[in-house]
Image (tube, grey):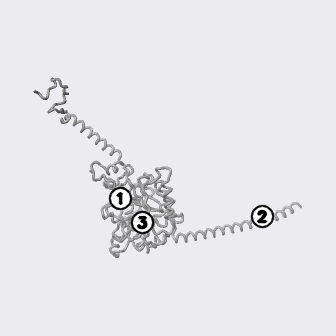
Amino acid sequence: MNRYPSAGSGAYPLSPTLIESRGRTYDYEKYHPRTRHARRGLLGRIGAGLGALLVLLWLFPSLRPRMDVFSFSRGEEWQIETVRYYDLSQVGGTARGWEREERILLCAPLRDAAPHLPMFFSHLRNLTYPHNLIDLAFLVGDSKDDTLSLLSESLAQLQQAKDPKQRFGEISVLEKDFGQKVDQDVESRHGFAAQASRRKSMAQARNWLLSAALRPTHSWVYWRDVDVETAPFTILEDLMRHNKDVIVPNVWRPLPDWLGGEQPYDLNSWQESDTALALADTLDEDAVIVEGYAEYATWRPHLAYLRDPYGDPDMEMEIDGVGGVSILAKAKVFRSGVHFPAFSFEKHAETEGFGKMAKRMRFSVVGLPHYTIWHLYEPSVDDIRHMEEMEQERKAREEEELAKKERLEKIKSQFDVDGRAQWEQDKAALEK
């Protein structure tokens, strides 16, 4: 007797996709391999999705850093909350960084800078590079005035601006004294005797500031002195377009008319000369050559003296020494080990030593002789003395002119009286 009747024996008929075996029914299509057509459809959908993702990343570069942290290609080992992954090949710096949303670290060392902060923050507000892509870093050191408190107030106003586009990115404020004893007046800061120690101390301040503030997300570093009086609002884009590792503008300063109206200011941007190299060989290993002083006649071509007011502002000049008033450098320069030497490096320190070191490591270092920014005019002791003498001379001239005018009035008055009396006498004689 058949224990397993077929469908025709009065049992319920089985579906065409079902089979009966030993009293159990199985769906054979459940275990049947997918057809080739179905696999092709699935692979096509996956390919289309990946293609759309690649197009999205290409159109919106800002999504790349966020995608990199948990990217499919990184694997599950990076999907940890406390782990941050950075692809430093994406922050090399390009000629049009504002289009690629490249971040800039703007560094400003401050010492007794309270009088200049309002002007400095006015310049910050006017920058045309997207403010949200600019991180600010300040180091306040060896100050005797209220630089720190005024800086805090200025930053609060800046970040509370009604227009979100006026607000900047991350802001770091550091405080560190370096035992700088040279006074901040013009005569002390620019005196020859103080240059070597002052430059080395300033180099330490720059290095401390940079090492504390530089982030893996920064593509550029911009150094800016707080006492720049006039500069183009587009200076970041203008310098960045050259796509150089290190680039500086020309720096002049305005003068009173009686001093000539204008003058080269930053003499620390220069090309090396054979005379300077020969001089360096005669100096002690700790000596520091500084430009603009009779004690060191280097006969170097200075960027400042090559300025033509009508020249092409994009013209480049390769240089060896770098002035520190306004420097734009790719962050990779510092990540590679270039810094501001607080010691004698090839007989130079601070920014000039930085330029020398960058050239030694084969980075491009250029200056723009016809692209000019203007430093604040600060009268020297001699200028002040001369102005006092000029003021005394002016007052003496005014007093002399006043006395002369009084004498003329007196003479005129006397002449009129005597003349009228004589006329009356002549008139009376004619009438007789």
Where is residue 366 shown, x and y percent of the image? 36, 60
For the residue pair 264 and 213, the one nearer the viewer reads as 213
Where is residue 67 shown, x and y percent of the image? 33, 49
Going from N to C along the chain, the mark reached first, 1 or 2, is 1
Q: Amino acid at mark 1?
A: Ala
Q: CA distance from mark 2 to mark 3?
A: 66 Å
Residue 267 badge = 3
Q: Amino acid at mark 2?
A: Asp
* Secondary structure of residue under mark 2: helix
Query: Which residue is outermost to the front?
Result: 1
Q: Quadrant of the N terminus?
A: top left
Residue at 34% over, 76% down: 284
Disc 1: which residue:
331
Instruction: Tell us which disc is closer to us: 1 or 2.
Output: 1
* Secondary structure of residue under mark 1: helix
Residue 416 badge = 2
* Secondary structure of residue under mark 3: loop
Q: CA distance from mark 1 to mark 3?
A: 25 Å
